[in-house]
Image: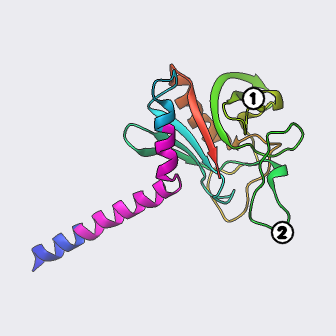
Amino acid sequence: MMKQCILLFLFIISCTKVESQNILVLDIPKTKILEIKDYLKGKNYNQDIAVFINFKVPSGKYRYFVYDLKNDKILQKAVVSHGSGSVIPHSNALAFSNIEGSYQSSLGKYEIRESYVGKFGKSYRLNGLDPTNNNAMDRAIILHSYSCIPDKESEAPACLSLGCPMLSTNAFTQTAKYIDQSKLPIILYAFY
């Protein structure tokens, strides 16, 4: 009887672990992961790591993910901002644009380029690779930290940017380690 109870307990724990891991992966739809794996084949980008932003997730929740493409697991999750122009009044939906002055976030694949030190401290230039974000360099859309972004998720929405994906200082520091250790550029994929 004791042996059966222990086995049942272990079974329940293992199911709970699997279930909790599946919940994390749902934040990045498998179709998006497969799309990026396919996109990277034969290209001069990091084949092991990609960054995903799921703008369907509310801004106060974890919706920024550094993802291990080889082992299919999330390495980092964080709160990330969207552009103030992306907010649609009286709606939970977001709008997206590639137009200068829209202050909207842009969807699509980005190449995370070199870092530099500017008014937000260390930042990374983002080169838009799709028609939906190919003005990113002209719009000065960058990956950077900002003090109003929280480290932990909450029900409260994150503060807004002028179109850039902004992370908390701690999340940015963690992401910078992945980017700086990579010999090849890493792809960031923002989707909705």
Foreground label between 1 and 2? 2
Residue depicted at x 17% and y 76%: 5
Tell me the magenta residue range: 11-36
Quadrant (top left, top right, bottom left, bottom right) of the N terminus: bottom left
Residue most toward the front? 131
Residue 184 - label? none
* Sequence-first disc among 1 and 2: 2
x and y percentages locating residue 192 in the rendered image = 65, 53
x and y, in percent, of residue 134 in the image: 74, 32
Amino acid type, label 2: His
> Looking at the image, which residue is at 80% across and 50% down?
160
Tag shown at residue 90: 2
Label 1 belongs to which residue? 121
Question: Where residue 82 sits: x, y (%)?
Answer: 74, 49
Residue 93 percent coordinates (x, y): 74, 62
- The residue shown at (81%, 46%) is 104
